[in-house]
Image (tube, rainbow, N blue to C red):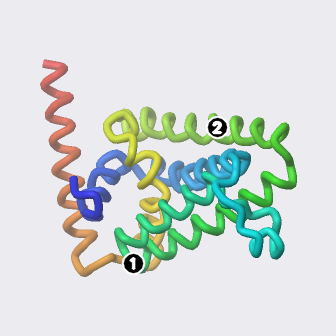
């Protein structure tokens, strides 16, 4: 799978997220996972000090949370300039918001909030996969998909369903054909295991 092949990535994602109830669960739970991960990463040591930024706003720290936000944002923009740039801005805003939340509540409370949110959101997603999709999450087949791609795909899913956005003409039709083929292949494998 090419690193920047959006069609293949989205078809893989869609193969595990075809049930509308499971899609809603992911829309609700994926971004809180990213946000709380950034809250946790706020407490990592600074990679370097920016005296200008510290003077303007001492809460924003160039640490692992910042690096993750930049890497995610650049990757999303490289996948699709319009939707990816929008997702990159959302990721950056999550980093800023997570920094303020982490600074205001402190580590003693933050790790508890992060743990509770992560457990709740991951459990909800796993529940959605087993109950509605009748299939294990994509995490078991592609860990990068679960951690790196999921926030962008939630954004793309919302843009497609709300305003009919497509990265290029015919994208949704091509992806749906791949999703249908992937699901058919998975069902055939399941049938062979049963027989």
Q: Quadrant of residue 121?
A: top right
Q: CA distance from mark 1 to mark 2?
A: 32 Å
Find disc 1 in the rendering and name its residue.
81
Q: Between 156 and 49, which is closer to the camera in this rendering?
A: 49
For disc 1, the neighbor class at 10 Å (few under 14, some 14 to 19, many from 20) is some
- Mark 1: which secondary structure? helix
Q: Quadrant of residue 123?
A: top right
Question: Which of the marked residues, 1 or 2, is nearer the chain's N terminus?
Answer: 1
Residue at the extreme top of the image, as rendered: 195
Place of residue 102 in the rendered image (x, y in percent of width and height, measured from the top left): 78, 52
Residue at 79% x, 56% y: name it. Answer: 101
Find disc 2 in the rendering and name its residue.
120
For disc 2, the neighbor class at 10 Å (few under 14, some 14 to 19, many from 20) is few
From the viewer's perspective, tell me whether residue 63 is left or right of residue 152. Answer: right
- Mark 2: which secondary structure? helix
Q: Nearer the viewer, mark 1 or mark 2?
A: 1
Can you tell which mark lies on residue 158? none
Place of residue 115 in the rendered image (x, y in percent of width and height, measured from the top left): 69, 36
Q: Quadrant of residue 82?
A: bottom left
């Amino acid at each position: 799978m090419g690193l920047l092949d959006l069609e293949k990535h989205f078809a893989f994602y869609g193969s595990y997220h075809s049930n509308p109830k499971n899609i809603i669960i992911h829309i609700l739970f994926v971004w809180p996972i990213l946000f709380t991960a950034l809250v946790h990463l706020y407490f990592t040591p600074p990679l370097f000090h920016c005296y200008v930024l510290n003077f303007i706003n001492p809460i924003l720290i160039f640490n692992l949370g910042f690096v993750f936000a930049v890497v995610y944002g650049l990757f999303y923009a490289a996948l699709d300039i319009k939707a990816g740039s929008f997702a990159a801005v959302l990721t950056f805003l999550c980093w800023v918001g997570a920094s303020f939340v982490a600074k205001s509540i402190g580590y003693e409370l933050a790790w508890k909030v992060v743990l509770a949110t992560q457990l709740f959101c991951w459990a909800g997603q796993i529940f959605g996969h087993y109950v509605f999709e009748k299939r294990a999450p994509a995490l078991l087949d592609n860990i990068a998909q679960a951690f790196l791609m999921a926030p962008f795909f939630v954004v793309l899913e919302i843009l497609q369903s709300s305003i009919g956005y497509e990265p290029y003409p015919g994208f949704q039709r091509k992806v749906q054909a791949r999703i249908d083929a992937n699901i058919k292949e998975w069902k055939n494998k399941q049938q062979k295991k049963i027989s």
